Amino acid sequence: MALWGGRFSQAADAKFQQFNDSLRFDYRLAEQDIVGSIAWAGALCKAGVLTTEEQQKIELALNDLKLEVMQNPSQILESDAEDIHSWVEGQLIAVVGDLGKKLHTGRSRNDQVATDLKLWCKQQVPPLLAKIDELQKQLVTVARQQQATVLPGYTHLQRAQPVTFAHWCLAYVEMLERDFTRLQDAQKRMDTCPLGSGALAGTGFAINRHELAHSLGFSSPTRNSLDSVSDRDHVLELMNCAVNSMMHLSRFAEDLIFYNSGESDFIELSDRVTSGSSLMPQKKNPDALELIRGKTGRVFGAYAGMMMTLKALPLAYNKDMQEDKEGLFDALDTWHDCLEMAEMVLHDIKLNEEKTRAAAQGGYSNATEMADYLVNKGIPFREAHHIVGAIVVHAINKKLPMEELPLADFKEFSPLIEDDVFDKLSLESSLASRCALGGVAPDQVEFALSSAERRLTQRDSSGIAVRSARLTDLDAIERLVNYWANVGENLPRDRKDLVKAVAEFAVTEVQGQITGCASLYVYDTGLAEVRSLGVEPGFQNQGQGSALVDKVLQKADDMGIDKVFVLTRAPEFFMKQGFTMTSKSLLPEKVMKDCDMCPRQHACDEVALEIVLKDKASLRKTER
């Protein structure tokens, strides 16, 4: 169904239609388009365009559609719709009839797609932050294990000075730290909502854009309608974050490919991330690392393409901007996969410590220590540098490491050199001498390692705050409970009940907005139940459900409750939280109290699970 046919007397050419349509890739925005449409229906209701009954009918139909899409997103691709917006509208009209045609009142596809894409971009940040965090933690783990492993450091791929493998790991921890904070900064700037900007000049209806923005999880609306529909800075910033991080991952991959080569033989990679040759049976190829290095180019290309697309576009929206999605989707998918693969590569990595130590001792990498030794004897550095260069040439001619030259040979170059020079030329002395902050001295590496461990342990990469509910949260709790009750996932609860039960609730906050809730209902016998668990559409798969369950279980534990149960149609989720299957017959209170008001009581598909809190506490101690 085209959304713009009235002006045209002829149908679009089939080839043009195929060239013009975007459903084949923007179907990934289906959930965001539905969530944005639900919010827009609510705004139209408050503006008097829709009645409450009409708004509820539209919202219920869109909720059902969202569940269908979540279960089978590929169904969208079977349609001949122009784009995801026309597909959603067509599906809505098929269910609610002409009422569905009212939804687009005051809205343009320009502000609609800008909103959908921003929502999608916002939702990509938490999982990407989590992947960066996981890779940093794995680097720190390996650094702790290999703290004493000496490694040659290189400049120009020539052995330069000895370092340790831990120091090498920590260098990439620092690079990834910049990637992490860069992504956090980008997240802040994309937290404005363009919906309500119309095609370019704003909407002609009394839409409260602040309320609308908050309902979609944005901190504020955008300020200028022209900019709102043509802004793709958030796309560029996310892709720039990907470009910087992929560059770091590519350098990481190149280092390990070199260390893994037969010429270096410093490391051995796990069989899980390598492959063999179809012809040469002895080969074990570092394919995971080579693919990380190779995929970096495609992310760079996507970013360059997006910059070229936007560089000369006049205000406001132009069809060129349809090119904002394919490259973005591919770049972020690739970045996510490469972060995951880089972490996998570090698992079960083996260091050949004899090889790394021998290489660190070779190549006259202690020459700088020799120069520093002469400086400490009172010789100016430039003169010391020249003297050591001559000593290295002499050692090469004698085919000896510098530390194996006799003292008499040293004295040919400077009478100030004494027996104490040999202690200074050892690997241990070379490492220990680099004692300034950030150096490779063992105490500095320990300091850096401990600091990184502490920082990563304290970091919350989710951006989610979990707390007990307050009375001021009631509107948000009521909205969430009713939303999931309409979908059929929770029991309905009226405002009066929620006011009485607010102390039972925990909520999650993202950037000041309530995005999830759960309650703990305690029975007279001391048995407790997790109820009303729900996360705002658009904020799922970010760990909020787990955080809420942990919060209410901690509350139950603090109250001295031994056992908590739940009735759910998502048993796998609760089993991941430590719950185990039980029988409904063991929960008579629940059956008697609530089942009469459940719309599915005659065809109940809920599963009963329980958790014994003392068992969970024991598990936590074991994990520590």
Image: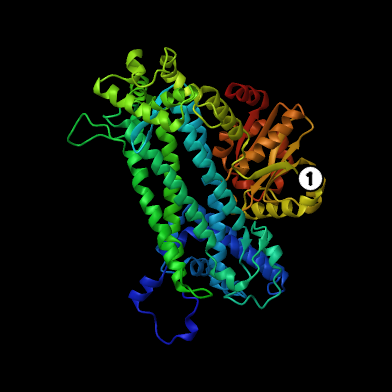
* Residue 568, picture quadrant: top right
* 41, above or below 555, in the image: below
The x and y percentages for residue 219 are 67, 57
- Which residue in the protein does label 1 denote? 502
- Give left or right: position of 502 versus 342: right
* 599, above or below 204, in the image: above
Q: Residues within 10 Å of mark 1 (few under 14, many from 20)?
A: some
Q: Nearer the viewer, residue 356 or 71?
A: 356
The x and y percentages for residue 5 are 47, 81
* Residue 300, picture quadrant: bottom left
Q: Which residue lies furthest to the left in this view?
A: 279
Q: Nearer the viewer, residue 619 or 522?
A: 619
The C terminus lies in quadrant? top right
The x and y percentages for residue 29 are 50, 60
At 67% from the left and 23% from the top, the residue drawn is 614
Amino acid at the residue labelled 1:
Val
* Residue 229, picture quadrant: bottom right
- Give left or right: position of 618 versus 113: right
The x and y percentages for residue 265 are 30, 27
| Secondary structure found at label 1 | helix
Q: How is the image coloured?
A: rainbow
At 71% from the left and 48% from the top, the residue drawn is 597
Marks counted in the figure total 1
Q: Can residue 147 be seen in this view?
A: no
At 69% from the left and 37% from the top, the residue drawn is 551
Q: Which residue lies furthest to the bottom in this view?
A: 9
Q: Can residue 91 be seen in this view?
A: yes
* 465, above or below 300, in the image: above
